[in-house]
Every structure is written in C-alpha cells, then in structure tokens.
Image (spheres, rainbow, N blue to C red):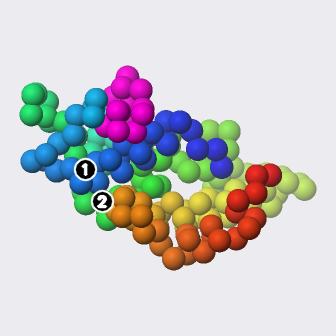
Amino acid sequence: MHVTAKADYAIRAVIELADSSQESPRKVDDLAQAQNIPVSFLENILTQLRSSGIVRSQRGPEGGYWLARSAEEVNLAQIIRAVEGPLVGVRGQRPEEIEYIGSAESLQQVWIALRANLRKVLEHVTIADIAAGKLPKGVLELTREEEAWQTR
C-alpha cells in the first residue's frame, strides 16, 4: 500500500487535534507548524475532513479546528477515506465492481482480501491509540515480525 503525503498529513493533523475541543480549537498555522505540514496543503485537507464530519471548525479570531467526535471514535481508515477515497481501488473502481475472466478470474478475491487486511489494521487503530502511544495488541504483534520491517 502506498500512503500518500495527503493521507499522512491528514492523519497527523487529526492526531494533533486529539486534545482539542470547541472551547479550545486549534489554528491551521499551529497545526501546520506542530507537524511540519505546508499550510496551503493543510487547509485543503481540513476542508475535506470537515466535509466528512471528522473535524469541525469555527471562523474568527477565537476560531480553529477540533474533532467532531472523540479521538476514540475516529480511526485511520475513516481519515484516509475522507481524503483519498476507498482503501483499495483498482483502476478507479472498487474490487467488488470488477469482473475478471479466464485465468485472472480469482484476482478479484485477492483485491478483496487485501482490503480486508488493510481494514483489520486501519479500522482498529484510533487517533486516541496513537496520541496515547498505545497501539492495539494485534497491531503491535504485526510490528514484531521481522518481515514487517523489510522492504520488498
């Protein structure tokens, strides 16, 4: 899986918002500086996150951004989908929408299995987990496998 800069920036921005609230919103400049994200890029990402209901915002001198739900309720898959679309797409389509024929017929099942495995990680890791530095046991177990650290 290729994680784009946009998805990475979106996740990092949401992590920064883990402790924010409507009473103490965070400014775009503050978020950008905290995570070394270009402000113009971050503004666009925050607009998409707001449209998806992940963050809320308020204009004005006392305004800024905060999470629309608790950090425990926001997972990585939701953020990625908000800025990039479906987790696994093949030529712009969802795997279940594609039909293969002949010797490639079972390829659809491969794409669906890939999506299922991505979801096992991305839907179970919340912003609260990352902000607290306490990842779910299953995710930590995956990182302990030597193969996980090898680039192929």
Quick check: is 146 in the magenta stretch?
no
Mark linked to residue 71? 2
133 vs 137, left or right, is left
Residue 120 drawn at (x, y percent): 55, 67
Q: Is residue 49 left or right of residue 100?
A: left
Q: Position of residue 97 (x, y in %)?
A: 63, 50
Lateral position of residue 8 relative to residue 117, left or right: left
Q: From this viewpoint, which residue is outermost toward the top?
A: 40
> Around disc 1, counting alpha carbons within 10 Å, would you say few (fewer than 14), some (14 to 19), or many (20 or more)?
many
Specify few, some or many for label 2: CA neighbours under 10 Å numbering under 14, 14-19, or 20 or more: many
Q: CA distance from mark 1 to mark 2?
A: 7 Å
Quarter residue 145 falls in: bottom right
**Residue at disc 2, secondary structure:** helix
Relative to 67, residue 145 above or below: below
Dot 2 amino acid type: Ala
Residue type at the position of mark 1: Leu
Viewer-nearest residue: 122 or 90: 122
Residue 67, label in figure:
1
The residue located at (9%, 34%) in the rendering is 62
SS of the residue under disc 1: strand
Query: Residue 51 lies in what quarter of the image?
Result: top left
Which residue occupies 9% across, 28% down?
61
| Numbered badge on residue 96 | none
| Identity of the residue drawn at 85% across and 54% down | 104
Q: Is residue 48 visible?
A: no
Where is residue 77 drawn, in percent x and y? 47, 55
Does 22 sit above or below residue 129? above
| Span colored in magenta | 31-45
The reply to whether dot 1 and dot 2 touch (C-beta < 8 Å) is yes
Q: Nearer the viewer, residue 71 or 84?
A: 71
Is 36 magenta? The answer is: yes
